Image: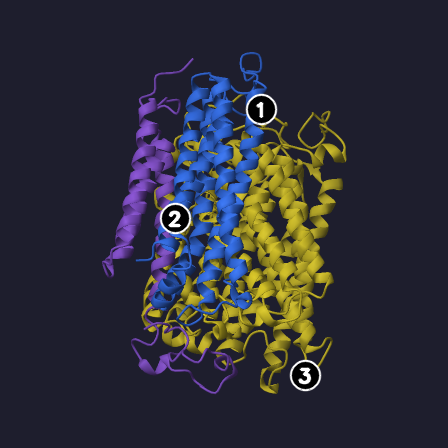
Amino acid sequence: MQTAHPKTDNHIAPLKIYLGTGAALLFLTAVTVALSQISLGGWNVAVALGIATLKASLVALFFMHLLYDKKIYLTVFLISVVFLGVFLILTMFDTMERGTMYEILAEPINPEAVIYQNQPPDSAAPIGQGGH
Amino acid sequence: MNDHSINHPGLAHHFSTPQQQKESAKLGLWIFLVTEVLLFGGLFVAYGVFRAWNPEMFYNAHRSLNVFLGALNTVILISSSVTMALAIRSIQLDDQPKTVRFLIATIILAAAFLVVKYFEYNHKIHLGQLPGKFYTFRGIEGTNPHLFFTIYFAMTGLHALHIIGGMSVLIWLTLKTSRGRFSAEYYTPVELAGLYWHFVDLVWIYLFPLLYLIG
Amino acid sequence: METAIKNNYLNSPRGILSWLTTLDHKRIGILYLASVMFSFLLGGIFALLIRIKLLVPGEFLMSAEAYNRVFTLHGAIMIFLFIIPSIPATLGNFALPMMIGARDVAFPRLNLASWYIYVAGAVFAVYSMVQGGADTGWTFYTPYSTMTTSSVISMTLGAFILGFSSIFTGLNFIVTIHKLRAPGLTWFKLPLFVWALYATAIIQILATPVLGITLLLLILERAFSIGVFNPAMGGDPVLYQHFFWFYSHPAVYIMILPAMGIVSELVSVFSHKKIFGYKAIAFSSFGIAFISFLVWGHHMFTSGQSDLASMIFSFLTFLVAIPSGIKVFNWLATLYKGSISFETPMLYGLSFLFLFTVGGLTGMFLGALATDVHLHDTYFIVAHFHYVMFGGTVMAFFGGLHYWWPKIWGKIYNKTWALVAWLFTFVGFNITFFTQFILGSRGMPRRYYSYPAKYEGLHEISTIGSIVLGVGMLIMAIYLIASLFRGRSAPANPWNALTLEWQTDSPPPTANFAATPVVTGGFYDYDKVSPNPKGDS
């Protein structure tokens, strides 16, 4: 019924793979909650995302069978992540760097303009410079 | 030459073998998941931009989220992924009754997730912690705190819609399995639904730290 | 000599219901063809309205508010309803499975659903029109689009729905090309049109969902003022532009890549010569698809984007010229010392080479930051994109339509009238749009209702050109439709081409082939085939 492929889509994983992955995911959840309670400065984001990526990899490789299946599915999925990264990074090159090369461009052209009238009283920075 | 209907009743006329048909379906679903990555991805970009512009506000605003409930939902969703994976494993082993039980377990866990979300949303509506012009809460320091809640509701809302969609598919699958539609010979829809479900779990794995665990 | 008409995909099964419930990729291609041509007509009417209005610098024909709606509808209909589905959903649907020796696409029901979704999106767009249309420009830029009273939501909902149609087509094609190739058809034996459709499908899959989320956020902003694009609420209107162009720039490559695929076929068949640089052309399609995702900020040089981002995007924009140039030079090398026949499809193929090159080169002025500051939002831009979209994609689409017409219908059109139509089209197009390069570089802004008297002469010339172009389109419509009723029967292979679809009847049987083809030779091996007399029998 089943031809002998080196990698076949019909691989049946042993029970302990699924239960083990589930346990690992629960453990990592506890870890990430615990670490978020400790202040690590700028590293909090990186650590949280790192653990999330580790969890996501476990889900993808074991639950979604990417470890056992043909490479095409993994390739397709990774490509989407790469392009999401491109979207994020190039957008942030704009939003994080406005007015950094020529400061005058960061100032509003007309501070009396209507769009600035509804700003909450404690916002001192012009639009796009947020919490800097 | 191409008439396989005698040997393989489920084989469509344009495929040569059931294996080819199954692999095509699976590739098709993975490509669909790619579109989902980019769909949610847009909201992640919006999150990135607004959080980078308003780091303190995001920190202050996120404290109104209940970490326990978020973690509980994470546990619920991970468990539902386990039950989903076990459902697929069961049908691979031709055990229809077990498959049905695991599918039902997945559906119940999904419903539990939505119940928790309902309580969270309700609390925020009550306090006025809402997106955009509906925001009326006082007590979060920082500029434009409504932005956080816009992002929060957009991301978790889109995610919840996907859970609801997934649940409908799972209910349909449960009914079909209990009527003997699937077996170890043919279970492609169950497998595809499983991939979709794990993806929904995957999105939450990122939503949870980004929204609930801001350092 | 008329033989008895065999059963083919057109005449069996019979009846409208059999067409509306068909799972045959060929019939679905025809359903799309009808819808897409209707959209082209609609968009074209709006174009003529624009050009007629612009004959007069001041108030004429319509109010300024109406004018805003007319150019918005022209753009939105042409882009979302016509050009994006045009080649993939019509010619791609028809020819792709046959070119790879398959019986159908991977997911025939999804294919039919894709067409119905298209129709649903079109209904929303027409509804929006009836409500007066949007007046924001097809780009729906915030903050105007969130504040204007025109019917933005119905138009954007239409575009949102149409996005799914595009995604499903792309998904179907990728799986079809991966899984349903005939025995012996390895990747590097595939026709270049197939490579082009594959690269296009990748863009459709990756980019269109971002349009989806963009339009969703726009609708929420408009309906519920969520604030993401509103600077008064801490949002950012330029963020909308990032979201919008992340899709819309790759979208223009969804438009051009299939066209380039057609040109690869035409240039080889009608020079009766092996395509030069097969692998380079194949890989360049992927190169274009990849780089297309890296350049969207070049639409935003004057929007307040950071200088660093602008510089990065400008640099990356110049990169995309490289794979495009590779294609053009390979096509030219194919023509060189070829046995060229000037059949109708080839006229359009050659037009593409010239007009796309002009359009592409003018893109270089726009990719350079300093010149773009002056040229942005002028008629220079309008001319640039019409050269690549019309002079490029639409010309190639016409070329493909005339190439596959005998296969699709089993009829041949009147070639003299085809030549006349081509002449009107080519001449009319250039008069219309070359003038606009001049208008733009002299400062005439786009989307403006009225203008200073000094531009009047050029506008008049451009409008005359558009009427000539319209006449060309009309003649084409007439002889093509006439061919269905009075055309001579076409043989299986009127062009002596080598790809698989020509090895079956015109029109093909429903199952495409009597037996699954086994591929041994190459599809461009014209050097191994004895030279044949040109034309059909």
Reading the image, the residue beneath label 3 is C58
Q: Closer to the observer: label 1 or label 2? A: 2
Give SS at disc 2: helix
Q: CA distance from mark 3 to mark 2?
A: 66 Å
Element under disc 3: loop
Residue at position x 35%, y 30% in the image? A70
- Residue C9 spot, x, y in % from top left: 66, 30
Residue C238 in the image: above or below residue C480: below
Say left or right for A56 vs C418.
Answer: left
Q: CA distance from mark 1 to mark 2?
A: 36 Å
**Number of numbered tags placed on the structure image:** 3
Task: Name the residue beneath numbered marker 2.
Answer: B68
Which chain is in purple here?
A
Q: Nearer the viewer, residue C435 or C18?
A: C18
Q: Residue at x 60, y 46 (%)?
A: C401
Name the residue that disc number 1 marks.
B176
Q: Are marks 1 and 3 on the same chain?
A: no
Amino acid tagged 2: Phe
Instruction: Give the letter of the chain under mark 3.
Output: C
